[in-house]
Each structure stands twice: as C-alpha cells, then as structure tokens.
Amino acid sequence: MPIEREQLEADVLIVGAGPAGLSCALHLANLIEEHTRAKKSPTLSAENIYVLEKAREVGAHQLSGAILDPRALRELLPDFEKSAPLDTPVTDDAAYYLTAGGSFKLPITPPPLRNHGNYIVSLNKLVKWLGEQVEAKGINVFTQFAGQELLYEGEGVAGVVTGDKGLDKNGQPKSNFTPGYDLRAKVTILAEGSRGSLTKSLVRRMKLDGRNPQVYGIGIKELWEVPPGRVEPGYVAHTLGWPLDTHLYGGGWVYGMRENRISLGLVVALEYQDPLFDPHEAFQKFKTHPFIRRILEGGKLVRYGAKTLPYGGWYAMPRNSVRGALIAGDSASLLNSQRLKGIHTAIKSGMLAAETIYEALCAGDTSAEKLSAYQAKIEESWLKKELWPVRNFHQGFHGGLWAGLVHAGLQFVTGGRGLVDPMEAKAGHLAYRNLHRERVLVDQSTRFKGDGKLTFDRLTDVYHSGTRHEEDQPCHLVVLEPEICGDRCVREFGNPCQYFCPAAVYEMVLEKGEPKLKINAANCVHCKTCDIADPYQIINWIPPEGGGGPNYEGM
C-alpha cells in the first residue's frame, strides 16, 4: 500500500546546506528584499525558500582542507570579516617534495599553491555561520531531512521526496515511523557536494553528462592539538612525493591554526591501478615522515574525516539546468583541481543560481530555456576565467607525476590548452589492474594497525569523526548485485572496497565456507568513495535516515 505523504509547496527548494546551497539561499533572499523595497511584482518572500540538510545540524557534514579564497564571500557579504569565523589569515607558504627519509623545499612556491590573501578556516564553523545568516532572513532550514528521490513532471523536476524515518533494517515501520514529505517547488537546486545522490540520478536520467566522465580524489584529514611553537598560525605547506609513488596523483598538506591546532591531510586521485592500495594507510604513513612527525609528536588527535573531491573540471561539467532544477557547487564540477579549492567557486555558483532563479520567478517561467541562463552567467563570470585555464590540468597527470608536471607547464604558457585540447579522461574505476586471483579472500591479518599515538587504524579514526547512525534502519549502501562481491570481485580485484573505504565499512567474511560481503553501515562517514571507486559500479550510496553521519566539529 503506497505511503501517504504530506505535501509542502515552496517557490525554491535547495538540497544541501553547504557553501553553494546556503549562498544561493542568502543571495536570493537579498534579491527578494530589494525587490520588495522597490515594490515590484510579483510578490516574493524568503519564507518560500526551503533548505534541506541531511546532517543533524548545519555544518556537521562539512569537511575541507580548508583554505578560503575570500573573493566570492566578499561579493556575497562585503563585511564578512567583521563576524565570519576566520581562523587565521595565511602568513607563509611552502611546498616540499618528500622522499622516504628526507624533504626538499622547493625554492619557489608554485603560483597555484600561493595563498597570501586567503584564510585558513574550519569549513564546519564557516557553514554554521552562513546558516545563521540564512535563518536570519526568515528562510526555512530543515536539518535531519535527507532528499531521497526527485519528483518529476514530464521532462522537468518538480521537487524532492524526503526520506522516511523510523524504518527498521527490513524496511518495516517501527513505533516511531514518520513518512517523508513531498516537497514541491518551482525550482529545485541540487547543491549536494561531491557525487550527490540526487544529482547522480538526474544526470543519468536526463543524460546531462559532460564531455568527460567525472573523476574524483579522496581527501583524508585529521585535526591535531600539538605542543606550542611547532607551527605558526597561518603557515601553509603542501607536499608532493612520498608516501605516494610517481604513478599516483596526490599530495599532502599541513596548515597551522590558532590554539596550537594543526590541520593535515592527504589527497589521492581515485584512478590508481593497484586495487589493494589503501589511501587511509598511505595517510597514516605520511604522518611518520620525519618532516610531519616532528610537528605531531607529543600532540593529540582531535578529529578525523574523509571526503571526495570532483577533479574533472570544465570538461566534466554536467549540463547544469533542466526544467525546474539547477546544479551548483561541487555537484556541478566547479572545483579548481589545480588550486584544490572549491569553497569560493561553490559560493559564486550559488549566487549565480540565485540570480537565475530570481529572474525566473519574476517572469513566472521556470522552463529549461529560462533556467539555461545559469550556464551563460557562469561563462560570463570570473568562474570561467578561473576554471577554463585549468580545464586540462588533472587529465595531464594520468601518465604520472613527471608527465603531469610537463603538461602543467605547457598548459600554463598556452592558457590551458597544452598539447591536446580537450584532453580526454576515463572514469577512475576503469584503471584497476586485474589480479587474476584464485577465489580466496586476501589475508587481512597484516593490515596496517597503527601505533595508537601517531598513527591509527580506521576504526579509531572513525571514532574521532563523531559518526553516529541509528543501527536499526535500512542499509544506505545498496549493493545491486551482491553475488559479484563473493565471486568475480574476489578473483579479479581482491575486493578493493575493503581498501578504498576510509571507514572500515566493507568487510569480506566466510559464511559456510563461501566469501560474502559484510557491510558495517554505521561506520560510514559519507565520503561516497564506494559509489565512485567500486570497479563494477554496483554500490549505490543513498542518504541514510536524516541526522545520521559524521560530526565534523571544528573541521
């Protein structure tokens, strides 16, 4: 029997209370205020803007390095420096190449890694603050509500169905069952971040893919408290080299924050050949390098987190508008992979989406043609001026570090063209090397365990992510063809889900002597690596019950 759902109507529905979604809401509210003061018609109200956020509070799922280029935030809120939670301005830059036992400081910090004029921030705190600005405008922000599926009307989007609450593991209602809502809107904005589940389904359904498939990296991060004097607040260092070999695209960072806190992490492109490569283990080894160890020794781990980043750039950008819907931020492939920055581009895309929506509401026209003005606004803004010259940057590293640096140099002098334009890419999961194994599980007894002081196993790190899920709920990690996991994947790739997941969600066990996948869904930190890196593309990440997931306090 179909579930009866309450329907709510809005002018605008924004899915995701991150930098893109909140900036869209705030800028649209400001445009509506000006509209009302000028006594223009039709009548518009910020109260008809709804923002959905799956986390238990705004900012809880927000994770980034994070260095903020303030350009877009200054456009959104010119006086932001008076109240925004900016940890510290960047005061010093450095770039290092690491070997197994040594480090070499580059004589000149590459221009993309220079950060003077930028701020080290906690994205969690920044987004919380943005949420306060949004709510002060009378906008409805609904936390603990996950967008489960899109509502369609003909060839357009008509809103979102939110997830049911109070279902048990078998999908049956418990005593606290509450059905989700049908939230209908004239315009829906998908600002879900990297590999958004609704964005993924919309792009597939309406064939909105860009010229290249989207490719991703995984960023793994820890926040530490260290003894005074180890790193000055405002110090920024980026690293290349060890523990990654020259065939792996990625690098590390160390940022000095106030109150003797250090943000450090490692990013790795999810397009490596060895299916048994473990990004979490690589990050833990990174901390044992003498350069990093000297900073951390005697300190204390405070927080842990992981997220994916869309590296594909301009040529992986999906068509970002359909009738009744727009795509913004990381969901729209607007991260600058050369600078590893996406907060400012997300904010700007949210503002441009708001301007497009305002014009559509004033015209009473939310057709695909009307909303296509969004792409034109992106191309006329500084977004394209920043992203176009790096349109081939990540693709240039597909042949390894040294070839990538050569390509990057050629692209720099040719305005992004390089030797080939466009450079083609393929989805990262296609890069795995077939291991041609027997149907025997890979021995896990020798897996990296950490020393418990400087380095940690994945479960210890998950504890420090503040992750919490209701145990008795349907599994939000849907394996579409589970028989593959215990047979074909054992033989071909050795079950890479046990390695690429930074939260120990996936585990292969023997059941009556047969290999079988066990899913520890309660560990999930919502990075969505599994949805991206699974070699058969049979893992479908969907939002769990609203409120579940990590708590990236201070991250």
Image (tube, rainbow, N blue to C red):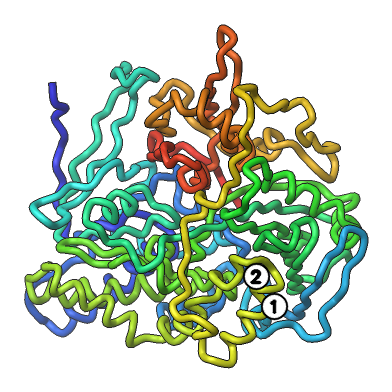
Three-letter code, disc 1: Val
In the rendered image, the vertical position of residue 350 relative to residue 74, given as above or below: above
The answer to whether one can see residue 133 in this image is: no
Q: In the picture, which quadrant includes the N terminus?
A: top left
In the rendered image, the vertical position of residue 250 relative to residue 153, given as above or below: below
Distance (Cα) linking label 2 and label 1: 6 Å
Q: In the picture, which quadrant includes the C terminus?
A: bottom right
Three-letter code, disc 2: Ile
Q: Residue at x 15, y 63 (%)?
A: 323
The first of marks 2 and 1 along the sequence is 1
In the rendered image, the vertical position of residue 540 relative to residue 32, given as above or below: above
Counting from the top left corner in percent of width and height, residue 275 is at: 62, 43
Who is closer to the viewer here, 424 or 320? 424
Q: Quadrant of residue 280?
A: top right
Q: Which residue is mark 1?
A: 90
> Is disc 1 surrounded by few (<14), some (14 to 19) or many (20+) residues within 10 Å?
many
In the rendered image, the vertical position of residue 242 relative to residue 469, given as above or below: below
Q: Residue at x 39, y 52 (%)?
A: 196
Element type at mark 2: strand
Instruction: Check whether the beta carbons of the residues at disc 2 and disc 1 lie within 8 A of each other.
Output: yes
Q: Which residue is mark 2?
A: 120
Q: Is residue 414 left or right of residue 539?
A: right
